Amino acid sequence: MSYPLIAPSILAADFANLQRDIEVLNNSEADWIHVDIMDGVFVPNISFGLPVCEAVHRHAKKPLDVHLMIVQPEQYVEAFAKAGATTITVHLEACTHLHRVLQQIRDLGCKAGVALNPHTSVRLLENVLHDLDMILLMSVNPGFGGQKFIEQTLPKTRQLRQMLQEAGSAALIEVDGGIDTSNAAALVEAGAHVLVAGSSVFRAENPADAIIRLKQVGQRAEA
Ligand code: DX5
Ligand code: ZN
């Protein structure tokens, strides 16, 4: 596998032309399609839900990377697995019984991810490192696309990568929020495997080219 993987977020797509934008991703170097689910409770915004995820799945030729920014995710993981998710990521801050939810996700045949808000320490994952497939570090406060990248994510990524190495974990590190060609290389160098990008892809004149540029910048940092 060559890193970084690029996961464009359809939160920044044109919802009135979603099929067209999915086709753009199908015909691009994008590795995954990042699907941001917001419930208006865990985060101060509502995005879209299960029917949209199902519809995206019908057209997508790439794995769906579903990011649940919702309370009580345990009530919905099965439905999102049925709606076509390959990876399901829940927020640590939304789970009283994180270990149980991760097991639930894996039992559904999906990859299990845990997302951390900017203020949440990676050390809180120490005891579940072997129960997850991916850690998503938020590099903005979740809820909106188009926000400014929080620089503290760089040392945090480094710290997490070291923790994973010491634990012998093969979990992937995904970083999400405010990512463009100005910070992609530093993130990969710090240890990120997967870069989520919404605005920098869909606001670009040519989204497919923007994806290639992100990947190339990252690959140079990885080499
Ligand atoms: C934010 C979402 C992100 C967002 C990224 O709550 O989790 O995935 O769509 O968008 P940009 O790249 O615009 O910050
Ligand atoms: Zn996201």
Image: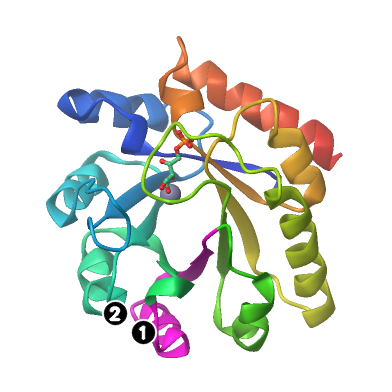
The image shows residue 65 at horizontal and vertical percentages of 41, 54
Quarter of the image with the C terminus is top right
Q: Residues within 10 Å of mark 2 (few under 14, many from 20)?
A: some
* Left or right of 73, for residue 28: right
Marks 2 and 1 in Cβ contact (< 8 Å): yes
The image shows residue 17 at horizontal and vertical percentages of 20, 23
> Which residue occupies the foreground of this view, 149 or 62?
149
The amino acid marked with disc number 2 is: Glu
Residue assigned mark 2: 74
The image shows residue 75 at horizontal and vertical percentages of 22, 78
Residue 91 placement: quadrant: bottom left
Residue occupying the far top of the picture:
205
Query: Which of marks 1 and 2 precedes in the sequence?
Result: 2
The image shows residue 155 at horizontal and vertical percentages of 78, 54
Residue 136 placement: quadrant: bottom right
Relative height, residue 89 to residue 216 (above, below): below
Residue range (magenta): 95-117
Residue at figure coordinates x 28%, y 67% from the top left: 81
